[in-house]
Amino acid sequence: QRVEKALEEIKGKEKLPSLAKAVVDKEVSTRLRAVEELSKLDSDEAVNLLLQRVIYDDVREVRQESAKGLGRNSAKVVDSLVSLLESKNSKIRARSAQALGEIKSLKAIDSLIKALKDKDNNVRAQVAETLGKTKFAKAAGPLINLLDKDDNCDVREKAIEALGRIKSIEAVDPLINVLGKDKDCHIRYKIAEALGEIGSLSAEAAILKSLKDKDSKVRASSALALGKIHS
């Protein structure tokens, strides 16, 4: 009933004030519906309301949908999100990076690459994930650097996933190198997966070797990767 009441207000003549109220409602479904309606509006007020949800909403789905809505007005918001990558609050930095991953603006690429050196593990992991979503080849080199230089497993996993999404050929040899020596079975699993996504035949020998890995998930991932390479 709360959702229906809020939606009725949204349909009224004073649409923006009603949406401003609904987008901070305690019900997640109401906020999501308000975000959907705000995304249709071409106004600075609507953009600001969506930007607030991107940064301050505690529900990831609401933040994602808000960021997608902002994507329709990306020229107005990319600069704001990029500036928030410098926030003193690590949560805001991470959420800004997440939003930029939905918008996928080339304009933000250099700032995101710089943010791979953020002191906060969660921020670096989110930035790596975002760079994978953008699929910009320029990000491959900085992501490759994380394979050996970053000591946080979550960050390295996101970097590996990102390199797979980008389908970076230049990442094949560095990934193979880590696959052969890393003690973390989950990292090896992710690398086999990424090599499959990249699909380079030059990785075949390394993947065949990892079919004998002591970890069953690594073996399974390697088998799938081999199938993708030859598909």
Image (cartoon, grey):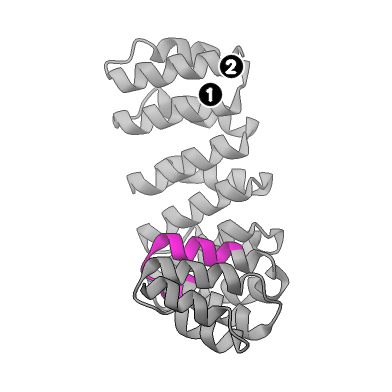
Looking at marks 2 and 1 on the same chain, the residue that comes earlier in the sequence is marked by 1
Residue 114 is covered by the magenta coloring: no
Q: Main secondary structure of the magenta part?
A: helix
Q: Amino acid at mark 2?
A: Ile
Secondary structure under badge 1?
Answer: helix
**Residues tagged 2 and 1 counted as in contact (Cβ below 8 A):** yes
Q: Is residue 145 visible?
A: yes
**Residue 208 x %, y %:** 46, 10
**Residue 128 x %, y %:** 50, 51
Quadrant of the rendered image containing residue 185: top left
Quadrant of the rendered image containing residue 187: top left
Position above or below: 140 against 113: above
Secondary structure under badge 2?
Answer: helix
Q: Nearer the viewer, residue 69 or 54?
A: 69
Name the residue that disc number 1 marks. 196
| Left or right: 81 as drawn, with respect to 215 | right
Q: Amino acid at mark 1?
A: Gly
Work out how far the residue at label 2 is from the one at label 1, CA to CA, in angstroms.
6 Å
- Mark 2: give few (<14), some (14-19) or many (20+) Cα within 10 Å: some
| Left or right: 191 as drawn, with respect to 58 | right
Q: Is residue 113 visible?
A: no
Name the residue that disc number 2 marks. 229
Quadrant of the rendered image containing residue 113: bottom right
Tell me the residue at 35%/21% (across/down): 218
**Residue 183 x %, y %:** 29, 29
Q: Which residues are magenta?
A: 54-68
Tell me the residue at 41%/65% (across/down): 29
Q: Which mark is residue 220?
A: none
